[in-house]
Amino acid sequence: MSAPREARVLVVEDNDTLRRGICRALQESWSVIDSVSSGDGAIARISDPAIDPYEVVVTDLRLPGADGIEVLRSALERDPRASVILMTAYGSIETAVEAMRAGAFDFVQKPLDLEQIELRVVRALEHRWLLSEVTELRAERDALRASEVLVAESPALREALDLVNRVAPTRSTVLITGETGTGKEVIAGLIHELSPRSGGPLVKVNCAALPDTLLESELFGHERGAFTGADRQRIGRFEQASGGTLFLDEIGDMSPATQAKLLRVLQEQEFHRLGGTRVLRTDARIVAATNQDLTGEIEAHRFREDLYFRLNVIRIHLPPLRERPEDLLALAHRFVDEFAHQMDRPIRGFTESALAQLRSHSWPGNVRELHNSIERAVLMAEGSRISPEDLALCGAYSGKETQGWRPELPPEGVNLAEVERRLVIEALRRSSWVQKDAAGLLGVSRRKLNYMIQRMGITHESWRRNRAPEGFDETP
């Protein structure tokens, strides 16, 4: 028998004498042995978010209340890697087949040999530990892949990635902050891949992309008939992410009403679908991200302070690219290699003047702006090295850092509305027409930018809405 390791085991048996005997046999090897006498009691313990998941559940098939199959399903819903051993005095091939199909690790007939039960538990734990080792190896592989994507030469980003490695294995809620384009979604994915939940789903929700009513349905789901057009039941993102990670992007754009509902879920780990009364539980880990100053939003009464404290358990801040000069050129060279290979272009780097321009630019769109700029430059370059003309960086406007910018006002004056429109279109073009990114360049919220776009009649073929009238010209 393998050397014992610390493990959590739950014994479910309505016969008091047998239950105590199994517990005594197992307690010689494992310190955490819990026991209950009914199926309902087992499901209550398994589902309790305050109790860590059990690695192994040993349960009788016939129990008062819920039966062993229901206990099995509850254990696997809480932790898909759990090993469940079913016991019964009424064994049959049909019963064993049903148990194994439901996900049982083993099936044991009574009367029991307690040494055999201990051996089955050992095998179940060895299987569990083997799966964990495979998961860890996969996580290490994914971390190596991430290191190939993430460039972390600067101390600030190295510190952020060190925190990612430390927080990923935990269940703690994480808040990722940073300007648009700094890589918050990449970090959220890395946290998931390095966590014990990597075998579960990573579900992403952009809180700024949907109006309030649709966002609530997206998060919590809805029942048929909950509102006009709800012709079928919808499973929400919280249900989909159970056992995995739920990534809430642009959390600062969430309405106060939805914030209140999210707070309740974080506090109680339960919710109900829109139009429904059944209470549902979730075991999703929350990772949130924002490019806004949430403390300022709290002072302006646009963001709940209690929700902020719930989300801000572990905060990972991603510094802007202008504060990471060590990463800038390494990223630029990596992007050149990437796009030159994709486009089959013989580009080998930058001219000295192009490198100087890269260093002097403030990069308000951060890594995403650099990525887009290099892609365009590789496509446009005529020689083997990228020139400043290929980069075509706009030096006059530098996003939020406007201290060095002095706009010129001609003697005849300007049309302010037209200047504003030209700036909006230029920001959209530099952001590949991604409104969220353009909003970051302009220093406004996505909702404000969407309002400006509709007011100005700006459209683009990749957008589903805001179609312009026939003959509309986007050229500023």
Image (cartoon, grey):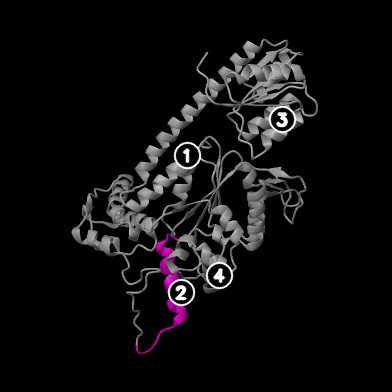
Callout 3 secondary element:
helix
Image point 24% across, 48% down: which residue? 346
Q: Quadrant of residue 202?
A: top right
Q: Which residue is mark 1?
A: 193
Of callouts 3 and 2, the N-terminal one: 3
The stretch drawn in magenta includes residue 422:
yes
Measured as percent of width and height from the top left, residue 274 is found at: 72, 52
Measure how far apart labels 1 and 4 are at the Cα level: 37 Å
Contact (Cβ within 8 Å) of mark 3 with mark 1: no
The stretch drawn in magenta includes residue 299:
no
Q: Quadrant of residue 172?
A: top right
Specify the principal SS of the magenta part: helix
Q: Which residue is mark 2?
A: 421
Say which amino acid is labelled 1: Glu
Measured as percent of width and height from the top left, residue 447 is found at: 55, 66
Q: Which residues are magenta?
A: 411-433
Q: In front here: 181 or 161? A: 161
Say which amino acid is labelled 2: Arg
Measure how far apart labels 3 and 1 are at the Cα level: 30 Å
Image point 44% across, 48% down: which residue? 186
Can you see residue 418?
A: yes
Contact (Cβ within 8 Å) of mark 3 with mark 2: no
Q: Which residue is mark 3?
A: 42
Measure how far apart labels 3 and 4 are at the Cα level: 53 Å
Where does the C terminus fall, quadrant-wise? bottom left
